[in-house]
Image (cartoon, grey):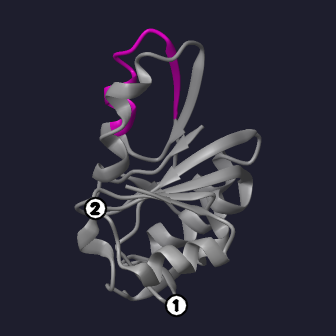
Amino acid sequence: MFLDSSTTVNQICPYLSQKNNLVVITNGLQTALTLNQMENITVFLVGGEMKAHSASTVGALATDFVLPFRIDLALFSCRGLDEGGIYEASHHQAHFKKHMITLAKQNILLCDDSKFKQPHFYKLAQYEDFKAIITNKEPDEQYKQLLKNAGGELLW
């Protein structure tokens, strides 16, 4: 599975300790360090350019690094979403995440309620790109309908 470098996705790491023989690829330094403490998980930290003030790797080297891997499930966060799609503030992060979305068999978006109705600089994806969106509070009916129309599931 792939876990993006966000603090949101990093929150699921403790739950992965209960799984056996898991292989995780991440471009997040903190996520890699957290998972590396768990004996049941093999961790691959994506190489690439580390952006200033970021604990994540991006760029062409990162994109090339993940090509040989088969990714069954990928978990992502975003900077915001609205009726037009899902957004990221950094085009570097968005480019890498877009690449990972195309490689994974299934994609799940994790976002808290503050991300709804928040468009940002760079469009990351459409709702059709995600099997599910998981959030902490029930979103407006508009978002339920958007994901239903896209063939996905909205969980809170």
Task: Note whether residue 108 is visible.
Answer: yes
Task: Note whether residue 55 is visible.
Answer: no
The stretch in magenta equals 31-44
Q: Earlier in the sequence, mark 2 or mark 1?
A: 1
Q: Nearer the viewer, residue 37 or 138?
A: 138
In the figure, 39 relative to 53: above or below?
above
Which residue is painted at 32% across and 26% down in the image? 14
Q: Nearer the viewer, residue 48 or 108?
A: 108
Residue 114: assigned label: none
Q: Position of residue 81 (x, y in %)?
A: 41, 79
Q: CA distance from mark 2 to mark 1?
A: 20 Å
- Residue 72 lies left or right of residue 146; in this view the side is right
Q: Amino acid at mark 1?
A: Gly
Which residue lies under the disc numbered 2? 137
Q: Nearer the viewer, residue 131 or 37?
A: 131
Q: Is residue 34 magenta?
A: yes
Residue 61, picture quadrant: bottom right
Mark 2 Cα within 10 Å, few/some/many (few <14, many 20+)? few
Residue 84: assigned label: 1
Q: Position of residue 130 (x, y in %)?
A: 61, 63
